[in-house]
Amino acid sequence: MLLFLCVLGALVVCANGGPDEVEAAYPLSGPTQHTPITYTRLTGALVDGERELGEEAGEDGELLDEEEPYFDASMVPSYTAYLGKTATLTCIVHAARSDKSVTWIRGRDLRILTVGRYTYTTDLRFEALHQEASSEWTLRIKSVQLRDQGNYECQITTKPIRTFNVFLRVVEPTVEVLGAPDIYVNRASMINLTCVVHHAPYPPEAITWYHGNKSISYTSSRGGVSVVEERGETTTSFLLLQNARASDSGTFTCQPEGMTPATINLHVLNGEHQQAIQTNSSSVCVPQLSALVLVAIILDSCCFG
């Protein structure tokens, strides 16, 4: 009977009442706790979602910055170049943000030489080298001159700017005959003339000895002649003349191919200037003869003795 009366009351309200009557009959328990979802809110949620997928967050929830570019620990602070040859300075940078992130600057005048793969100087001897996705930025200097010696800066365009200093040393090949300008020997003694080539990018193809304007070799008509060479970072040529005689006096020239020659004046004495010989020999540091040179002397003695 009670159920029938409740149903009947609801029908009466629906038939005779409006929204106010419905609210009075069935009051809500309280206002809704859900905020209406808007397009703006959804867009923000998607952006946040993309960031969570694309970037790493720190412990406090804040996004971490991108990795800062940095220099490779294996970079060397100095290079050596030979006069007239090509010098190559290499800067290794990791995590560079663009191809224009690395700059080469000349220290003596702070002139910008290269930016990334581009050269910013009218001196055509300078050239920028960089391959895409490579961590190496190279400064190439062709036909190196003595004035190119000095400091060069490799810079990364960070804030603040990071700099790595490189020193370029330019060396000039030189030729010398030990004991120059004059050397004295006794008659009938062994003559040992030593020619040394320093700072050559590679050993000279040939080294020719001259007495006056006449070339000397082991086939010379004089006889008792040995020419021995030791090649390496420093190239040495030994001219050995057995049984020194008065006709050996004069100017001897050492001529490495493609290089400036060096000369020495030889004086063969009859024993009358011992003081000159002793003074000369004490002031000259002549390298010890190697086993190869000694073998050459022995063989020469057998053939011409």
Image (spheres, helix red, strand yellow):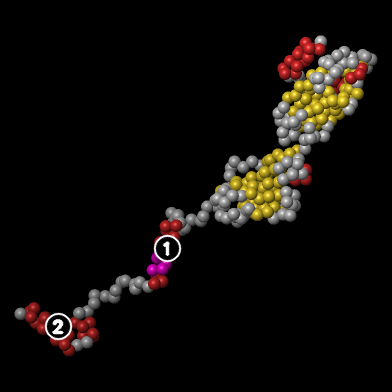
Task: Report if the CB atoms under discs 2 and 1 are less than 8 Å apart.
Answer: no
**Identity of the residue drawn at 39% across and 70% down:** 41
Query: Which residue is under mark 1?
Result: 48
Can you give x and y, in whole percent of width and height, for residue 153 in the image? 68, 49
Whether residue 207 can be seen here: yes
Q: Nearer the viewer, residue 207 or 103?
A: 207
Q: Is residue 34 left or right of residue 166?
A: left
Could you say which is closer to the camera, residue 141 or residue 228? Answer: 228
Using residue 39 as the reference point, say whether residue 178 is left or right of it.
right
Mark sitting on residue 202: none
Residue occupying the far left of the picture: 1
Q: Nearer the viewer, residue 1 or 111?
A: 111
Left or right of 216? Residue 118 is: left
Q: Secondary structure at mark 1?
A: helix
Q: Nearer the viewer, residue 84 or 160?
A: 84
Instruction: Return the x and y of residue 281 as percentages of the image width and height.
Output: 85, 20
In this rendering, is residue 64 above or below 254? below
User: x, y percentage for residue 249?
Assistant: 91, 21
Give the crowd class for mark 2: few <14, some 14-19, many >=20 residues within 10 Å.
Answer: few
Please tell me whether mark 2 sits on a helix, a strand or a loop: helix
Where does the magenta region start and end? 42-46
Q: Quadrant of the N terminus?
A: bottom left
Whichever of callouts 2 and 1 sits on the residue coming sooner in the sequence is 2
- Amino acid type, residue under disc 2 in the picture: Ala
For label 2, the residue is 10
Q: Residue 61 lies in magenta, yes or no?
A: no
